[in-house]
Amino acid sequence: MKPVIYGIPTCDSVRKARKWFEAESIEYDFVDFRKQAPTREQLGTWLAALGNNALINKRSTTWKQLSDAERNEVEHGDSIAILLAQPTLIKRPLLEYDGETAVGFSAKDYVTRFGC
C-alpha cells in the first residue's frame, strides 16, 4: 500500500515531504485538498486519530480569516462541518500509511516510519 499525502501543492511542508519521498524512491499518492476535499468520514477518522489540536492549523491564513463564531464552532462544536467547508485548515502534510495518520513533515520521523 502506497502512502498518501494530503495537502496543497504550494505548501512548503508538503513540498518537502514530496521531495523526500522522491529522493528515497518511494511511490506515493498526493491528494490536493483544493481539488478533492476530504469526506466527512475521512475527517472523522483523522479527528479520532489526532484530535482537534493536532489536526487544525491555527496559524494558517484560513484560520485567521474565520469569524469568531466559526472559530468557536471548530473548538467547541462541529469541527467537521467547518473543515468540510475549509479543508485548508488541516495541518499539512497529512500522511496516511499502514493504518496510521500523521501531520507535519519531519525527515527523521519519515526515516523511522519508512525504514530508510
Image (cartoon, rainbow, N blue to C red):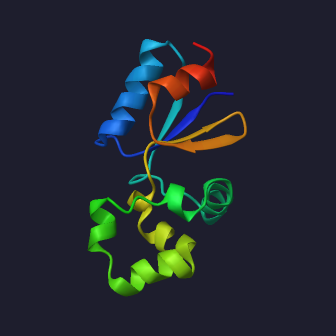
Closer to us: 90 or 10: 90
**Quadrant of the image containing the C terminus:** top right
Residue at 55% from the left image edge and 64% from the top image edge: 52
Residue at 48% from the left image edge and 67% from the top image edge: 83
In the picture provided, is 60 more to the left or to the right than 21? left
Establish if 81 lies above or below 106: below
In the picture provided, is 13 more to the left or to the right than 38? left
Toward the bottom, the furthest residue is: 69
**Quadrant of the image containing the N terminus:** top right
Q: Quadrant of residue 64?
A: bottom left
Number of labels in the image equals 0
Establish if 40 lies above or below 78: above
In the picture provided, is 25 more to the left or to the right than 59? right
Residue at 62% from the left image edge and 25% from the top image edge: 113
Residue at 49% from the left image edge and 82% from the top image edge: 73
* Residue 74 pos. (x, y %): 49, 75
* Residue 12 pos. (x, y %): 30, 38
* Residue 34 pos. (x, y %): 38, 54
* Residue 84 pos. (x, y %): 50, 68
